[in-house]
Image (cartoon, rainbow, N blue to C red):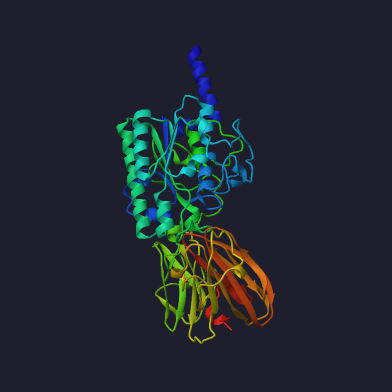
Amino acid sequence: MKNKLISFLLLFFLSCLFPNATLATGNIKHVIVIGVDAMSVGGIKQANTPHFHEYMRNGAYSLRTRNVLPTISAPNWEAMLTSSGVALTGVTSNDWRNDNYSLPPAVTTENSRYPDIFYVLKRSDPTLKTASIHQWEGFGYLYDHHFVDIDATCKDERATTDKVIEVIKKEKPNFLFIHFDQCDHAGHVFGHMTPKYIRAVESADQLASEIVNSTKEAGIFDETLFIIVADHGGKGKDHGHETLQGNEVPFILYGKSVKKGYEIPALVRLYDVGATAAFVFQAEMPQAWEGRPVECAFEGSAEPQHLIGTCMAPSTLIPLISPHKPNGEVGGLFVHKKALVTIECAGTDGKIRYTTDGSVPTVHSEVYIHPFEMTSSGVVKATWFGNDGKKSDCSKGYFRVVKLVTKNTGVAYKLYKGINLTKVPDFSLLKPILQGKTLEINTDEMENKIGENTALVFQGFINIDKAGTYTFFTRSDDGSKLYIDGNQIVDNDGDHGVQERQGAVDLTKGRHAIKVEYFNASGGCFLNCLISGPGMPRQIIAPDLLENN
């Protein structure tokens, strides 16, 4: 009688601490996180991924999961490991190291690290067996190795999978975090959503199925929860910084005690990965953690409450405006030819609405029915409006329609070769190796001439029709600077991926000198220059605004 009373009181106490624990966790004894670097929502949708789709049909999922900024690997893997964002962890870049950082962590453990999931689990139950097997070496810098029993870095995805299967069969770890890197590599080298990127996503699908099957062979499948997730998506050959394609990732829960075919109605964040694992093992979570367990995904758990607002439709329903290029540019330059606009969307239960003046589409905007022609330069924007009240993010395309080209149209350029460039060089110390004229201030026309340690200067004049305040933007990989009338307006310098910076200036009506300096250190090159002002929506600077002398 006494033992029964003790057992009852213990269960009552646990139910107070974890109200859904007995319902949600069941007999889960193993949690395996399958992390795929740069695997986007669009990638899973477009690729042949039968296993991921099976796990969604027989599990719970969210294709609207948000990551953290900046949209790079280390801060986002750290968010999963620590259920916290950059402001708390201090992991601001891929260069972060525990002994070399700018922003210190908000709280630290006895080992001077921000508390991660391995630490939390071991602190809760030292008998739990933990493991980390990863392809990207940088992943290993992000957690406290003192609390990881099995730790391995592998050369490629095949070796990673083989090691994972070996560990599952021999060691049967309670918590295993896996990192695959092939999608990120394909995205940077070939571009996101290209055929080779899609094949990398399909490879991740196949490898995930091998891992799931290995738990069956090890006899632990019926006690295992699988979490399939990515750190970021991508756009063009970059991570898609500050875009839905880059900041929205798949999140799939599959296995023991998970609801079947359940699309998670609550907003899921990468913070929630570590919190969900801690919840399953009934481990006490640090007060500093920002993540919340995705409790509603488990059998017997109540639906989430206080869902204020409507979640945006997933990035796969963003209308696709054509023409578009592999580097992510939508629209283009049309000289003496028609600018025919086509808009497509995967959504069937709704309508595409669009504008051509740069304004954001509303429920009152024009409904897209068939392709149309842009007869002058402008910005096309399109949004999918679902019949259920949801809507997609707005896509946009910059169309520059030029009907007359003279010898003065565009700007002059000079191309230079530098050494070990990390910022825009002092051009007075260099001699140009190539010079000429180009219609726009970008890298489109001379991409095949730009290699490693290459720099460019574009110079000419811009015609302003109406006096007022104008904002100039440069989007570049790597650094760029923009000058108006000899004054620096935009500073986007440094060795970095595609990023945008801006600056404003008051201009009188008439002609003003414009100069743009740019450099490419290594890898892919990219530069675009944009303008907005009185009566002018944000758009790429069109050739008919430019003069080279």
Give the residue drawn at x 45%, y 41%. Answer: 297
Give the residue drawn at x 59%, y 32%. Answer: 111
Q: Is residue 42 above or below residue 470?
A: above
**28 left or right of 272 in image:** left
Q: Is residue 359 visible?
A: no
Give the residue drawn at x 60%, y 76%. Answer: 536
In the rendering, at what x and y percent does residue 319 appear?
A: 44, 65
Q: Quadrant of residue 489?
A: bottom right
In the rendering, at what x and y percent does residue 344 appear?
A: 40, 67
Viewer-nearest residue: 129 or 373: 129
The total of numbered circles placed on residues is 0
**211 left or right of 153 in image:** left
Viewer-nearest residue: 521 or 50: 521
Viewer-nearest residue: 217 or 24: 217
Give the residue drawn at x 44%, y 68%. Answer: 352
Quadrant position of the C terminus in the picture: bottom right
Q: Is residue 224 above or below residue 310?
A: above
In the rendering, at what x and y percent does residue 412 appear?
A: 55, 78
Q: Residue furthest left?
A: 217
In the rendering, at what x and y percent does residue 250 appear?
A: 44, 49
**242 left or right of 299 in image:** right
Q: Is residue 295 above or below residue 314?
A: above
Q: Is residue 130 visible?
A: yes
